[in-house]
Amino acid sequence: MAGLPTWLSGKESGCQCQRLRFNPWSGKIAQATEQLRMCTTAAEPVLRGAGAATAELTLCGSRSPCSAAGEASALRDPPPAAGGKPLLQQGPSTARDQINACTVPISEIITVEETDVNGKQYSSGKWQKMEKPYAFTVHRVRRARRHRWRWAQVTFWCPEEQLYHLWLQTLRELLETLTSRPKHLLVFINPLGGRGQGKRIYEKKVAPLFTLASITTEIIVTERANHAKESLYELNIDKYDGIVCVGGDGMFSEVLHGLVGRTQRDAGVDQNQPRATLVPSPLRIGIIPAGSTDCVCYSTVGTNDAETSALHIIVGDSLSMDVSAVHHDSTLLRYSVSLLGYGFYGDIIKDSERKRWMGLIRYDFSGLKTFFSHHCYEGTVSFLPAQHTVGSPRDRKPCRAGCPVCRQSRQQLEEEQKRSLYGLDGTEEVEEWKVLCGQFLAINATNMSCACPRSPQGLSPAAHLGDGSSDLILIRKCSRFNFLRFLVRHTNQGDQFDFTFVEVYRVKKFQFVSKPAEEEDSSVLGRGKKRLGPLCSEHPTSCCCRSSRSSWNCDGEVLSSPAIEVRVHCQLVRLFARGIEESPKQESRG
């Protein structure tokens, strides 16, 4: 084998030439190959790396038409290094080759399969000169714009059967070491969520990729509310490697409640106890976006694209995320991962629930109506600052893939919990709660940025997914014009907290109690004020009438009780995601 250095030539869809050069070094190559470089120049193969998780397959291609992509060449073996071992180093390369280089980690190869070359015809090149060509195809992830991933493939040709099998064996053995990849998934599809396209999106964009990656699935199309949650309580979920939900944020919330609730039941943890320490679930959740907003998917992946999410599931990405438990009178109301909003956002969701017949436009209608109503609510907010976190809500450092803030904050939180357990210091009894009273237009708590296509920066751009805290945003009573200025900041790059009537705190627990309003006036004027909020005679231009109480918007669901107690559970669930990648490099299609 050491005497058979050979060119392998490959061709990728989009007319992008690829050549693969590989020099097999004896029988040790299966164990030694951790990084494989495919080049168009006279470069020796680079075989190095400590494991498949960090190994890379480098493709260097020309953007010119594939007129001679099949040319085969022979190269001499590189000289041995000191000690008699092969010296594996890259040879000379041109600037053009470096520009067109595309490095693909082994962890982002979907699969490698044999390719049937019988009966194939080529109009150009020298593929035909191979007496009996052998070919294999590498299916991989290709990065596109706006954090999207795309499926791509490259086919490589070889005249020697032994060399062909060696490549297949090497790549497949590397892929087998990637134990984080799922093999069997439970899939819930909401056929009515968003625009009612969930089933079609899964069948057209996701199922073919799962089949290509040899992932088996069991599919449940939900027929009623809480169908997925009830199924997760009843099914044997130990046989699955993960749960996939196809739908919007409501569908994800349903799967989240089912999985977290089932995990606590199996562990004997009482969810109704606000001070209980919840047990993380071993299963990851995958989100195939098919809703109207897809806030959770957008905030964790950077896009609400179904193919991108499917590829993150296939390669086995993992991202830990905080979950807030919302209680009232020692009773669990709901879990929250994105937005917990009182006042403005609570009124919107409550009003929109009465107008489901309007479809998705009901959110815009209810939002406009709530804005003009301009109600404020009096109450008391008590919160426990998150002293363990290393960031702040206004540091303009967003949560990204491999986030050091989440990692360091979790470590400090664990140390804090250990000290509390042994009674050294930092116990909850001596920690200082802060109390704020007043009239509020909105009270928002976010565990993530809450970004979406309409608000790319989100409600709290610097909120972190796994730092064990929530950003508590208080919008105090102000004029309608100032509140509009605040809302507009969500759609641009401005600092949305740079207002005198806006306060933001990073907390790990908080409570809210509303102050009951005075008895409503039974007169005609009183009834008119209740119906036509902004048109009351006392404040014709900047009405901010105090209403009795609002409702909480908990990830799109209405909580009727205004008095709540919230606690953030650090990294309670894991998603098939890796976080938003910083300035992803895009690949040319040629």
Image (cartoon, rainbow, N blue to C red):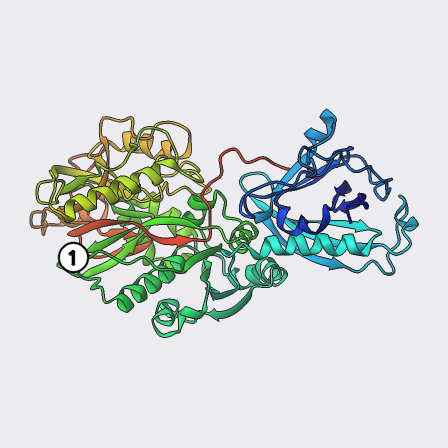
Residue 379 in sight from this viewpoint: no
> Residue 493, how many percent across, how many down?
41, 28
Amino acid beneath label 1: His
Residue that protrudes farthest toward the front in the picture:
83
- Which residue is tagged 1? 328
Q: Position of residue 384 (x, y in %)?
A: 16, 41
The number of numbered badges drawn on the structure is 1
Q: Secondary structure at mark 1?
A: loop
Percent x, y for residue 78? 76, 35
Taking the image as shown, residue 315 lies to the left or right of residue 247, namely right
Q: Is residue 71 above or below residue 128?
A: above
Specify whether 363 is left or right of 14.
left
Where residue 85 appears, x then y in whole percent? 68, 39
Q: Quadrant of residue 77?
A: top right
Res. 178 visible in picture? yes
Circle 1 crowding by C-alpha within 10 Å: few under 14, some 14–19, many from 20: some
Q: Nearer the viewer, residue 196 or 398?
A: 398
| Residue found at x 61% / y 63% | 211
Q: Quadrant of the C terminus?
A: top right
Q: Say which of 539 and 154 sits in front.
A: 154
Task: Report the side of 189 relative to 474 (left or right).
Answer: right
